[in-house]
Image (tube, rainbow, N blue to C red):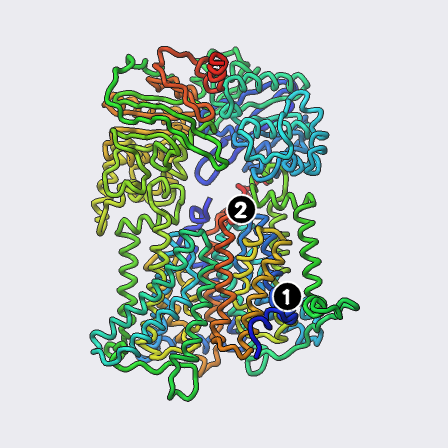
Amino acid sequence: MTDIFDIVTSATLYAAAIRLALPIFLAALGETFAERSGLVNVGLEGMMLMGAFGAVLGSDVTGSALAGVAIGLLFALLVAAVQGFVAINLGGDQIVCGIALNIGALGVTAFLVRAIWEGGNAPQVPGFSAFHFPILADAPFLGVAIFQQSIFVYVAFLLALISWWALMKTGWGLRMRGCGEDPLACESLGIPVKRLRWQAMLICGGCAGLGGVFLALGELLTFSDGMSGGRGFIALAVVIIARWSPMLAIPSALLFGAVEAFALRVQSSDLNVPPELMLALPYVATIVVYAIVVGRSNPPAALGRTYVRQ
Amino acid sequence: MNAASFIPALTRGAVALVGTLIVGLIAVLAAGLDPVTTLQAIIDGAVGTPYAIRQSLTEAVPVTLTALGVAVAFRAGLFNLGGEGQIYIGALGAVGTALLFPELPSVLLIPFALAVGTFGGLVWGAIAGVLRAKLRLSEIITTIMLNFIAFWIVSYLVHGPLKDPGGSGYPLTREITTSAQLPVFGDLVPSGAVLMLVAAFCVWLLLERTSTGIRIKGSGSSASASRFAGVSMSRVTILVMAVAGALAGLGGAVSLQGDQHQLGDFFSPGWGFDAVAVALIGRGTATGTFITGVAVGALRSGIQSAQGTAEVPSSIAQILLAAAVLFVIVGNAEGAGQMVRRSWSRTRGLASD
Amino acid sequence: MTALVKMSGIVKSFGETVANDDVSLEIAAGEVHALLGENGAGKTTLMNILYGLTIPDEGTIEVGGVSVAPRNPADAIDAGIGMVHQHPLVVGALTVAENFSLGGLGDGSADSMLEAIADVVETIPLNVDPRARIDSLPMSLRQRVEIVRCLAHGVKVLVLDEPTAVLTPDEVEQLFDEMRRVVEQGRSVIFITHKLAEVQTIAQRVTVLRRGRKVGSFAVGELTSAELAEQMVGREIAKAPASQVAPSGGAVRLALKGVSALGDDGERILDGLDLEVRAGEIVAIAGVEGNGQRPLADICFGLRTPDAGTVLHDDMPLTRLKDWGRSKVAIARIPEDRRHEGLLIDAPLWENLLYGPNLAAKRGLINRRRELKRSRVLLEEFGVVPPDPMAPPSSLSGGNQQKVVLARELSSDPDLVVAVNPTRGLDIGAQREVRDRLRALRDAGKAVLVISTDLDEVMEIGDRIGALYRGRLQEPVARATVDRARIGEAMAGLLDHQQERAEA
């Protein structure tokens, strides 16, 4: 009879945690750039969803998962472009726009799924299989937990490193952070605030889209309505919990991945716990951790404030 | 400079409406349907027969009630994205009460169940309000989390303790007795619709004719001015989130007692999110929200009927809503006015840059 | 004279307001040129155009004979123009070195910054830790960072927008010396100001703007002060009425004893303040921005409880607003920032007139017709133009907005008035009106406390005058017994040091 101890000490739990954390992490990484530049992007959920949809569409049509990645990214970037245009060029209400895009993504994906595939359901598509690291995959415990993951995981880790270096160690990153603190001062120094924010927004869309792509092609291998399941919003909390740092987003996202993995394990074990309540666990955890962390949080000063040059 | 000073409100509204219709047209064409027959089918389905009208009103009630709540919160600068969860909790409260006290006479049971549902929604909304007021947690994140939590709580209950033993295995509660069901007036107007109208009026009264309303609007307008005026932001926050939750809870209860009569996993087809769009389109005013809500209810109902006759996908409604909200934002955006002004004067040959 | 900078026919409108109406300006090399005008005359707009922050509707700019059209500050800097703003445009959360790096000087490290500014600091010394965060520095230092940054880019023209607002009189002297040295090196300085005295001290030539139009350019010395003032406002300004004889003690309306307040880092931002304001007098407190005005005002406004000491209003402890509850509040509070604190800028005036601590007393439904009527009467009484209760404050001029605040606050006929920078950003006519009203309140037996960073205002309006420096208050004394120099010393903390030395 499996019990909690067995679950918590199994390497597969941690492997699952990493897999489940990945989409959240990617979305949070992208949002970190956006928020560091001063933009609030509530439309993460929509970008993930469009990314997932595009990935399944591309993979189905061409039979290649790589094409799925490209199409998924494209779709997510389209959403980011709208959010960017409204927020940056028009100075419109960023939060309302994000909400609208989420609703729109739900509608558009549902619409297209019915329109493109018979019976209104997306098919199973080729995805990405796990990648076994040559020697490390055979290591005890860690081998299963870390070194047999999808290639996405390793790419994501690299992205985290690159992002941290770019944001904190380069002039470009400094200028971007400046935009998020005081866009007027940066403008007065000749820093192209609009351009930098656009870059941040597109990076955000790309990362969130990648998260959606992985959701579809790395996990479920298909698309279902609303499959992002609130991860875009969890990612918003992760950014805050991670103090707007790309590296801290890793453990923060992993925390939620672990909770979700744990809940799923418990659900499928013979422990007598109602499965639905387990499924609610990640959302409860989000609120709890968010509450613990928020007191000491220091967001970019100009976050979410409309900035339009006269 | 706001676009408002350059593009008068009427033009913006017209542009938004036309734009949304164009988007709808594109969607309909993309679905391979004929626009004219589709439109006809939707209109017929919405208001063509007395039954259709009744269905439209029924569909409109939960969306509009929730939207009124979103509107109140929006005026205070808060985003209640938790309509879905609050609707479920409201329905849960109502169905629980109805199933627990079926012997009570209608005249007691109906309002009692409605009240419990409303109260449940109120609490669910107030949780997010307290988290925001006392712990500074963004309600955007917490209300979404609470949505999922509410959904799973209800799901657990309808798969388990509350499951209808004789109901052929579906995850649904028993049906509530007729003593708990809301009547329909003249077979045309569901009592929920009357409640919806009353609620809209009360919200209007609150926002436009009470000091609390001024404080709500002031908090949403300027935090520093409100602090200076001695308005307690934290009290306003909790109040509006409670009100929003209560209205959504009422919406859930009404839908349960007036229409669905039992609670299951798929109780709400996304009313909570439609409600957000409705409130945003209505710019957070009671009248705007009410009118938009009724229109959206009719639209959804019309599309549902049209699904049978003309195969209109229900997702069109969401697409239209999203498009409408986007057009509204763009019309109100600060920079939009500048762009229009510059291109306008360029066409008249006045600009020098 | 070959002009170093030549602006011709500049036109710029913001909506219905014409900020610059066909303005032309010529700056010679090696001169300090003052740009003089009241608040709202268009000076900052004109310079923002020169600096590329704003794009003109019409007009041309030449620098050194070459036509330029800066679309952003980077273009302006390339053309040799630098600008230092009233509130320095530096990024608070970043360090000094990082701010220089943002400006293209150094890579964010302390060494690279020092290297980049080595030449400039011989003229303009900058004593600051490169790794310090900007928001930990006082305004005067932030301004200095901005000046050094501009000069390190090698600009030929340096524009300063009202730089003396954040400086003590001694720091002003130092700044003027440095500007003279900058000009000796062949550069030019454009000095935006609304203060005549500064024009006379530092400038060689002055261009006067009034209501968006250029009134004229003169050599300093060509006109007398009175004539210059007239150019600025377009009519003769009557001298301010001589103050009443120092009033004898009326009842003490507001009493602070030993009041201290702690800042975020635990340091004292108010230190053992003693202050009394009596009926029938105006107590005016001078001081450079950032020396404790904000916490002092917040305490007197009931927005903050002191960390030590007592505050009594009419012998009752003055508690936080939240506890005022339904009791009628007898303090008129005029905040510093009328647009963001004093008013709901987009809400209709009638709602604004209700938006205060007394709003809680309005239970039940509001009779809108009655409120509209009441509002109209109030607006007319206080001279708000136009007195439309449905219009939002955003449609009114600064002066009228301030009148709305006064209307709201004074409508309950309170016996104590606390005002912070009541005439900031107002044109001379509105300034006069507000000050007259404060004097009238004093004459009617009210107790008035004015906290102002404008020394001229303090000297003009105060019956008793005190100075705030680093959270310590120089005991307010009758105006007749002090002169400007002494107050200036108090503002700079010199009197403190003298006292400390005497006690040592």
Residue C483 on image: x %, y %: 41, 12
Q: Residues within 10 Å of mark 1 (few under 14, many from 20)?
A: many
Are marks 2 and 1 in one subunit?
A: yes
Relative height, residue C77 to residue B210 (above, below): above
Q: Chain of mark 1?
A: A
Numbered circle sitting on residue A18: 1
Residue C237 image-quadrant placement: top left
Task: Report the amino acid beneath label 2.
Answer: Asn
Left-right relation of A231 to B204: right
Q: Where is residue B146 shown, x and y percent of the image? A: 44, 64
Reading the image, the residue beneath label 2 is A298
A208 versus C373 height, above or below: below
Residue at point 53%, 53% (across, down) = A40
How far apart in space, not on screen, are marks 2 and 1 (Cα)?
27 Å
Viewer-nearest of discs 2 and 1 = 1
Tell me the tag on residue B211: none
Residue A105: x %, y % from top left: 53, 66
- Local crowd size for mark 2, using a 10 Å CA cut-off: few (<14), some (14–19), many (≥20): few
Q: Nearer the viewer, residue A227 or B115?
A: B115
- A184 shown above or below B301: above
The quadrant in which the C terminus of chain B is found is top right
Three-letter amino acid code at the position of disc 1 = Ile
Instruction: Identify the element where label 2 is drawn.
Output: loop
